[in-house]
Image (spheres, coloured by chain):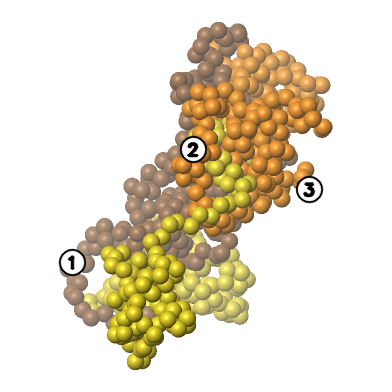
Chain colours: A orange, B brown, C yellow
Amino acid sequence: MTDQLPTLDPAADVTRAVEATLFAAAEPLSVQDIAAYVGPDIDVKAALATLTNLYASRGVNLVERGGKWHFQTASDLAHILRREREETRKLSRAGIETLAIIAYHEPVSRAEIEAIRGVQISKGTLDVLMEAGWVRPAGRRETPGRPLTFATTPAFLAHFGLETRRDLPGIDDLRAAGLLDPVDLAFEAMELPETGAEAEELESDDDHA
Amino acid sequence: MTDQLPTLDPAADVTRAVEATLFAAAEPLSVQDIAAYVGPDIDVKAALATLTNLYASRGVNLVERGGKWHFQTASDLAHILRREREETRKLSRAGIETLAIIAYHEPVSRAEIEAIRGVQISKGTLDVLMEAGWVRPAGRRETPGRPLTFATTPAFLAHFGLETRRDLPGIDDLRAAGLLDPVDLAFEAMELPETGAEAEELESDDDHA
Amino acid sequence: MAEQLVIDAFELPKAVDEDRLTVDVGSWEGPLDLLLALARSQKVDLREISILALVDQYLAFINDAKALKLELAADYLVMAAWLAYLKSGLLLPKDPEIEPSPEELAMRLQLRLERLNAMRDAGARLMGRDRLGRDVFARPAPEGLRVVRKSLWDANLFELIQAYGHVKERAEPPLHIVHQRNVLTLEEAIARVSRLVGAAIEWTVIQRFLPESDDPQFRKSALASSFLATLELARQGKIALKQAEAFAPLYVRAA
């Protein structure tokens, strides 16, 4: 291919100069802009035509927009240029409590969740649960205000290894398993940082103010 | 030319993908970085070789610097592009010498730099080199005092157009001539004829201290 | 010892204010820098340099500077003194008792100059390269590569039900249940002591009235309850108590 050989011919040198100028420019350039770099006696338009043709099938294309020229990555490759990175993150305490309340009480409105939790929930908490695919909106309740209710999803059951919601242990089971032991609560009260985090979350939640 | 036709062949598509990734990247990319975008089963190295060859005679070249790849304008076109660009801030003589000493001796401690230059490093010299992104702290030497050492960065190689430190101008000659060895070592390596013949172990006087 | 002195002599004084130095003796960065500049002016390979000529040049420069009433930094004068000493050593007949020899000192000075010179050249060659951002250019406004972070949320069933338990417990008023403990209640103790004392007229030590047990906690509880029981029964006039002094055995009998 000719573009792999050292260029001896003046037209090729012009093309190279235009190519480098466009590459190094922070903004799209007009023909006049380019001429200011490569010199007045140069057929910039011919060079642009050559380059457009040369790059047409490449990963990078030379394009004209409103009389200005610039390189851009080929549009069919856009999907490559974004990479998804998966990060495992721990659900916050507010998140897991809200999820539990939804699982035990669904369909349940936000106000009901807050009544059960005894503290308000921030908007982000439900967003996270929906982003995780565990919670879905479950229609509006036909009561004054028609509050939106939430319920769990099949993905929730799958993630937590449950056949149905009925597999969730009842309150008596929890107490028997020591999960409702008051000692636990006493310990929790000592974990001040956690309490602080909860308070912060509430402060940042301005739509309850 | 084949590269002007729509590519149907998978190898060409891979090359286009690597080309677009490098073109869109804000920073030089390693082979691993590129693979994270174009996919794990892709022969990135082969694509890089193809592209390097393809762009070798163009106004834009693909270059490797310290294991990372990026496109840059061809150096012979500097005269066209240098216009209207502010000269990179001029490095002081102390800065240049210190940078050279670090590059040719790395990892090297501050005291060793000072021993070669014969003067103390003034406060801003290393700061400027680190701010430019050319020099980084490179751990402590396990000698008394555990002095911090310094070394160059990939950005240093990129800025000065070096693929690796082995490309530092004249480094092989300097090493062969012993000019990268400390004075003590170099002196011991020299055979001074009179040392054997005349030296007798004597109490040294210290009046020239 | 001798080695140490050589190094000391070459490790030039460091307390140099660079700004002042520039004002005082031109653009040299310390005596070694000045020496190298003078050596290069000999226009020969540094390996061929005449150290004696170099010393003369340096001393002449320092003398000129003094004549111009320039204030010389101390390290320049220290170097001048050291070079004068070196010169005399090189010129005078060899004295084998001087260690290290002037020739060694001269050689070390030359090695230092060669090294500084090599790095100065290397720096110049580095700066002369095609530099990114000055001679060659990267793409200044790349589209950029995006990393889309996709969170995988992590929680397990245990955490879920534990969280629910916490919520319920917090919402409901807590019920505190005191565990059954093995104690002798005051009522039991009163009944027991009054029964055992009966109509006994002999003084009997209180320990005799305690129930048998292997549980030390129960024994403590029994002693405390029984003691309170004796006080109560004494108050009621049913029994009499006797104790010789504090912590002495406590005796009980029917009143």
Location of residue B190 (image quadrant)? bottom left
Residue that lies at the very extreme toward the front in this rendered image? C199
Q: Which numbered tag is attached to residue A173?
A: 2
Disc 2 and disc 3: Cα gap in Å? 37 Å
Counting from the top left corner in percent of width and height, residue B47 is at: 49, 21
**Residue drawn at 82 percent across, 21 percent down:** A66
Q: CA distance from mark 3 to mark 1?
A: 91 Å
Question: Are the residues tagged 2 and 3 within 8 Å (C-beta)?
Answer: no
Closer to the eye: label 1 or 2 = 2
Q: Please, is residue A181 above or below residue C225 in the view?
A: above
Q: Which residue is mark 3?
A: A209
The numbered mark, 2 or 3, whose residue comes first in the sequence reads 2
Up-down relation of residue C171 to residue C102 (above or below): above
Q: Is residue C57 visible?
A: no
Residue at (82%, 32%) from the top-left corner?
Answer: A144
Cα separation between marks 1 and 2 = 93 Å
Mark 2 neighbour density, 10 Å: few (under 14) some (14–19) many (20 or more): few
Going by the numbered disc 2, the residue's amino acid type is Asp
Callout in the foreground (3, 1): 3
Vertical arrangement, residue B188 with respect to residue B154, above or below:
below
Q: Is residue B108 left or right of residue B93?
A: left
Do discs 1 and 2 belong to a common subunit?
no
Question: Which residue is labeled 1 in the image?
Answer: B196
Q: Give the amino acid type for the residue marked by disc 1 in the picture.
A: Gly
Up/down of A129 relative to C236, above or below? above
* Residue C61 percent coordinates (x, y): 52, 72
